[in-house]
Image: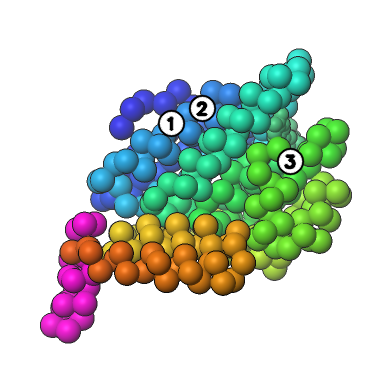
Amino acid sequence: MSEYENLLISIEDRLATVKVNRPKALNALNGGVLADLEQAFTELDQKSEVGCIILTGEGEKSFVAGADIAAMKTMTVLDAQKFCDLGHRAMLAVENCRKPVIAAVHGFCLGGGLELALACDFIFASGASKLGLPEVNLGLFPGFGGTQRLSRLIGKNRAKELIYTARMLSAAEAFQWGILNRVCEPSDLLSEVEAVAKDILKKGPVAISLAKEVVNRGTDLDLTSGLTLEKNSFPLIFATQDCKEGVSAFLEKRKAQFKGN
Ligand code: DAK
């Protein structure tokens, strides 16, 4: 794995952990972090020895406290366009990565930080975390996909309330609103995320990757088109050794040994 200036990446037993590493700025997303995220998730996507990815932030205080506000001070419209393109590419590299990506959120998860977590497949958070889109406090609005991904996840009206008021939600509220899949005791967050990731690693990787793509593409379609997408993608899985292995293992009453082919 390449070295990244703004990320800490470890890989153990097919589980990669990516930490945004700017704790002094509460892991705020500047151009360097976004470029590293885009490149690292593109690299992880290609790495056959990685089956699942956890995305989190370094330090106690924050997952990611937003896009880097200092970087915006002198931004021209053209700079903003470049920054926006880079941010969108980074989020898409996470969202389109063919491995499951789980966000482990602790502390502040604000603005671009929440947008980054929303690009992951799902989010577990520490009970002490705070989540929100406070951009309007700065005279901005979410520009890394938050207006779209959040409204698709929790519905337009709740997304608008969060965006218009800049309110920070507690983890319990964010769970109730459907943003979080699970709220954990702060000290248990990583172990709970790792346990789910390890469970996923036991399943057929090609099937998971196809399921991810079909869910992601299908949610933007009407039901008939989504069902057609599923119907057309499903038979492909019968070309894999993993499918033969999974079915045989069940019938032979043994654990399947998936190889990802
Ligand atoms: N950017 C840069 N630095 C940040 C930061 C951020 N978002 N958040 C915190 N920091 C820095 C602080 O400046 C401080 O640095 P020093 O003063 O020590 O050098 C350090 O991190 C510690 O922060 P605090 O001292 O403020 O810590 P507290 O515990 O007192 O407060 C806080 C924590 C999270 C409540 C507070 O730091 C805060 O309100 N931070 C800002 C949160 C926020 O507003 N986030 C949303 C950012 S706007 C765009 C696309 C997308 C976006 C923008 C443009 N284009 C397409 C152009 C997205 C925008 C956003 O995400």
Of callouts 1 and 3, which one flags the residue occurring earlier in the amino acid sequence? Answer: 1
Q: Is residue 111 above or below residue 130?
A: above
Q: Residue at x 24, y 57 (%)?
A: 260
Q: Quadrant of the C terminus?
A: bottom left
Q: CA distance from mark 2 to mark 1?
A: 6 Å
Which residue in the protein does label 3 denote?
A: 142
Mark-to-mark CA distance, 1 and 3: 23 Å
The amino acid beneath tag 3 is Pro
Q: Nearer the viewer, residue 8 or 140?
A: 140
Q: Quadrant of residue 140?
A: top right
Identify the residue at the far left of this view. Answer: 252
2 and 1 marks in contact (CB < 8 Å)? yes
Please tell me whether mark 1 sits on a helix, a strand or a loop.
helix
Name the amino acid type tagged 2: Ala
Q: Residue 26 versus residue 161: which sits nearer the camera?
A: 161
Residue beneath disc 2? 35
Residue 59 visible? The answer is no
Relative to 192, 33 lies left or right: right
Q: Is residue 148 left or right of residue 54?
A: right
Helix, strand or loop at label 2? It is helix
Magenta residues?
242-261
Instruction: Name the residue that disc number 1 marks.
Output: 39
